Image (cartoon, rainbow, N blue to C red):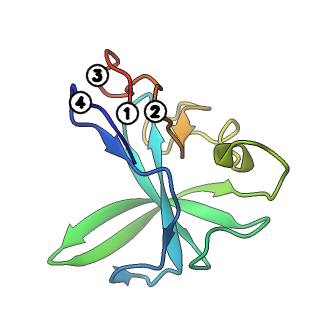
Amino acid sequence: MCLCRRCDFSFSSDHQHGSYRSDPPMGGYCYALCVQCLSEFMLPTAGPRGPHDGERMELCRVELDRERVTLQGTGVHLEFYEVATGAWSDRFTLATTACPECRSQGTLKVEFAPGDPCPRCKQAKLI
């Protein structure tokens, strides 16, 4: 989990194993954020241990209603590939996918690290 002390931004760059009560049910999930418009999305995965090679995941908007999570698909998908790389985010098709909200291409991120600039306030570094 990375966070900003200046503006209270926080983001989990990890895949979450298992799901909470959602409609539709999902095996697991991770998050994506557009650094241009700051829209947040959930990426449901088929399995609880993370996406599998070649898995296509739809960017979903999240709606909370009395402890129930409803996902609304955007029609925009990311793909995940098991490639030899140092960064987990390099395994997603981020550079070629446009944000469903602002349509900016190459602005979606699934991973932040301590020391990265805060995408919200742009004045502090994440810890």
Please tell me whether residue 32 is drawn above or below residue 37 in the rendered image: below
Q: Which residue is mark 2?
A: 114
Quadrant of the drawing holding the C terminus: top left
**In whole angstroms, how far apart are the C-alphas of marks 3 and 2?**
15 Å
Say which label, 4 or 2, has the lower sequence index: 4
Q: Which residue is mark 1?
A: 127
Q: At 61% from the left edge and 32% from the top edge, which residue is drawn?
A: 106
For the residues labelled 1 and 2, say whether their Cβ atoms are less than 8 Å apart. Answer: yes
Between 119 and 1, the residue placed more toward the observer is 1
Q: Whole-Å distance between the Cαs marked 4 and 3?
A: 10 Å
Quarter of the rendering containing residue 22:
bottom left
Give amino acid for label 2. Pro
- Mark 1: which secondary structure? loop
Sequence-wise first label, 3 or 1? 3
Q: Which residue corresponds to mark 3?
A: 121
- Crowding around mark 1 (Cα neighbors within 10 Å: few <14, some 14 to 19, many 20+) is some
The residue identified by callout 4 is 5
Q: Which amino acid does the dot numbered 3 rest on?
A: Cys
